[in-house]
Amino acid sequence: MALYHRLLGRAARLVWRVTRPRTIGVRAVLLDAGERLALVRHTYTDGWYLPGGGVKKGEAITHALHRELAEEVAIEGATVERVLGVYHSRREGKDDHVIVYVVRAGADTLHRGDALEVAEAGWFDPDALPAGTTPATLRRIAEWREGVTGEGRW
């Protein structure tokens, strides 16, 4: 199934290079009571990421955030503390805007949500992130740790 998702991802990136869509995404610096961070590894791409995803047409951005947390890491009832930043990405041929929130989980239990989309999910100490954590994820975590509001390049 992972191969199927990887092929779909490659096809989508090809379409995006041609159509150059404007998209909106959400990600969460999701924290438990012990200040551990939730990260996910998807089936369709390499690396560890902050949980999140795309905002659907007609969907409120915060609704998309909560939907993605439920889908990817089975967390419901999380509390949004603040917006970490708003970022722009031209990767994959898209004109993508990503809003990152700092969010507190209501529970310390983290489960991999959609098994077709998420290969692994876990809590990680900010000083012991897994190998393969993506550069953009590392930048967002650094901004959170510094207490700054991020902006600009994803």
Image (cartoon, rainbow, N blue to C red):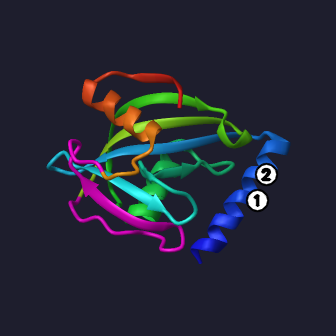
Task: Using the image, tell me which numbered label, if any, was put on residue 38.
Answer: none
Q: Nearer the viewer, residue 52 or 65?
A: 52
- Pointer 2: residues within 10 angstroms few (<14), some, or many (20+)? some
Q: Amino acid at mark 2?
A: Leu
Mark 2–mark 1 CB contact (< 8 Å): yes
Q: Which residue is mark 2?
A: 14
Q: Is residue 55 left or right of residue 104?
A: right
Identify the element where label 2 is drawn: helix
The answer to if 119 sits in the magenta stretch is yes
The answer to if 127 sits in the magenta stretch is yes
Identify the element where label 1 is drawn: helix
Q: Is residue 96 left or right of residue 146?
A: right
Q: Residue at x 26, y 30 (%)?
A: 145
Q: Which residue is mark 1?
A: 11
Q: Residue at x 42, y 24 (%)?
A: 150
Location of residue 81 with respect to 129 vertically, above or below: above
Q: Residue furthest left?
A: 34
Give the magenta part as a residue range: 107-129
| Distance between mark 2 and mark 1 Cα atoms | 5 Å
Q: Amino acid at mark 1?
A: Ala
Main SS category, magenta section:
loop
Residue 26 location, x and y as percent?
Answer: 51, 43
Q: Residue furthest front?
A: 131
Q: Residue at x 74, y 56 (%)?
A: 12
Q: Nearer the viewer, residue 130 or 58?
A: 130
Residue 15 location, x and y as percent?
Answer: 81, 51
